Amino acid sequence: MKILIVGAGLSGAVLGRSLAEDGHQITVIDSRPHVAGNCHTERCPETGVMVHVYGPHIFHTDDAEVWDFVNRYARFMPYRNRVKSMAGGMVYALPINLHTINQFFGKAMRPEEARAFIEEFEADRSIRDPQSFEEQALRLVGRGLYDAFLRGYTEKQWGCAPDTLPASILKRLPVRFDYDDNYFAHRFQGIPAEGYTEMVEAILDHPMIDVHLNTPYAPHHAMRAEHMVWSGPLDGFFDYRLGRLGYRTLDFERFTADGDWQGCAVMNYPDRDVPWTRVTEHKHFAPWEVHERTVCYREFSRACGAEDIPYYPIRLVEEKALLKAYEALAARTEGVTFVGRLGTYRYLDMDVTIREALDATAKITARRAA
Ligand SMILES: Cc1cc2nc3c(=O)[nH]c(=O)nc-3n(C[C@H](O)[C@H](O)[C@H](O)COP(=O)(O)OP(=O)(O)OC[C@H]3O[C@@H](n4cnc5c(N)ncnc54)[C@H](O)[C@@H]3O)c2cc1C
């Protein structure tokens, strides 16, 4: 088959590669001047630092097949994400763990003591059936930790009051009663030595794949294709005819400095009077490199306008109803497979994106054979 793939992010690249290996002729187009979508990395010409252009990306998975897949195309370096949080002028470790709790309450508790302390003295046991994110947090960790670490960050990240968000967002206790500050719990974790863009270029490097950058989709691109894979926005495919699915977008205030600016890759700022959500210092994502200067991003979250880059799908009640309507349109659209974070309007980590792209390949091939 001749297959057109819209989007050269991870979804498009992985599908392109696996369909090409199945013998199909692939054309990939992307409106951006580079491949890798939101995982794009590039070296800063001034400092030599590898910059995660659309925000920091750490690869983490329990899926051995996906881990093998990415290791075919890049040399992965071990990396553990250890996030810090600047709250009320003090620096704490995240996720909230025994160190954070002891430091925050000025104590030296052992795990079971800390567990009992939170349950007996902090957690709001008068809340029996939490209805909102706020109630759930107060029930699980209490006012002190909620106000310091969760409330302001959530307000800034989602642009709404936490008592208007569903309790389901905070399913589990957001606290660890040991000193484990490894942000992700997955077996395989790392960052490609030369960045994600080089990895995606290697995935797309196949004689049956043509890549066209700076090429926004237009209907004539699909004319000669027998099948299309769409990893652009789901509502965009239908010209937003039912309305726009809501997203949050990010603004990055970039600055450079000499030496080491904050001593770690990610510092969260949960205080309500600080407008940014976090600062990322990119050279700490590549601790195997040495650079005299440094590149940082101050990150701000806001509602996504028509011209902005959609980052996080909002997926509250209103958006879910609209999503259902678009999904119904997509189900009636012959010859198009909708994939990826934009094509399915979900937050997807990179490993899930790759898993779903590999599975979608098998489905396209099976449907064709049938
Ligand atoms: C701030 C942030 C941090 C993240 N950090 C992590 C992390 O640490 N670890 C992790 O596992 N995951 C992380 N993710 C998730 C990761 O970014 C996604 O898993 C991944 O980008 C999904 O790839 P995709 O191909 O589906 O989408 P995208 O990367 O968005 O690619 C879609 C591509 O389609 C192109 N496109 C769209 N419309 C058109 C059109 N009309 N014509 C032509 N081209 C079009 C776009 O230009 C884009 O290049 C993070 C996401 C965000 C937002």
Image (cartoon, rainbow, N blue to C red):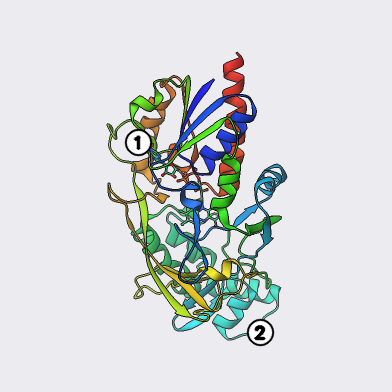
52 vs 199, left or right, is left
Cα separation, mark 2 vs mark 1, equals 52 Å
8 w.r.t. 228: above or below: below
As rendered, which of 355 and 166 lies closer to the eye? 355
Residue 146 visible: no
Amino acid found under the numbered disc labelled 1: Asp
What is the x, y in percent for residue 296? Answer: 45, 71
**Badge 2 local density, few (<14 within 10 Å), some, or many (20+)?**
few
Could you tell me the amino acid type at mark 2?
Ala
Are there few (<14), some (14-19), or many (20+) residues within 10 Å of tag 1? many
Q: Residue at x 46, y 74 (%)?
A: 148
Residue drawn at x 38%, y 27% is: 221
Q: 127 or 87: which is nearer to us?
A: 87
Q: Is residue 308 above or below residue 297?
A: above
Q: Specify the label residue 355 is tagged with.
A: none
**Secondary structure under the numbered disc 2 in the rendered image:** loop
Which quarter of the image is occupied by the C terminus?
A: top right
**How far from the left and from the top, in percent, is residue 158?**
38, 58
Q: Which mark is residue 108?
A: 2
Nearest to the eye among marks 2 and 1: give it: 1
Residue 241 visible in rendering? yes
Residue 349 location in percent, x, y? 55, 49
Check the image and report above or below for 19 versus 175.
Answer: above
Earlier residue among tags 2 and 1:
2
Which residue was labeled with disc 1? 235
Say left or right for 64 vs 353: right
Quadrant housing residue 110: bottom right
The quarter in which the N terminus is drawn is: top right
At 43% from the left edge and 75% from the top edge, which residue is drawn? 256
Q: Secondary structure at mark 1?
A: helix
Comparing 172 with 233, the one in front is: 233
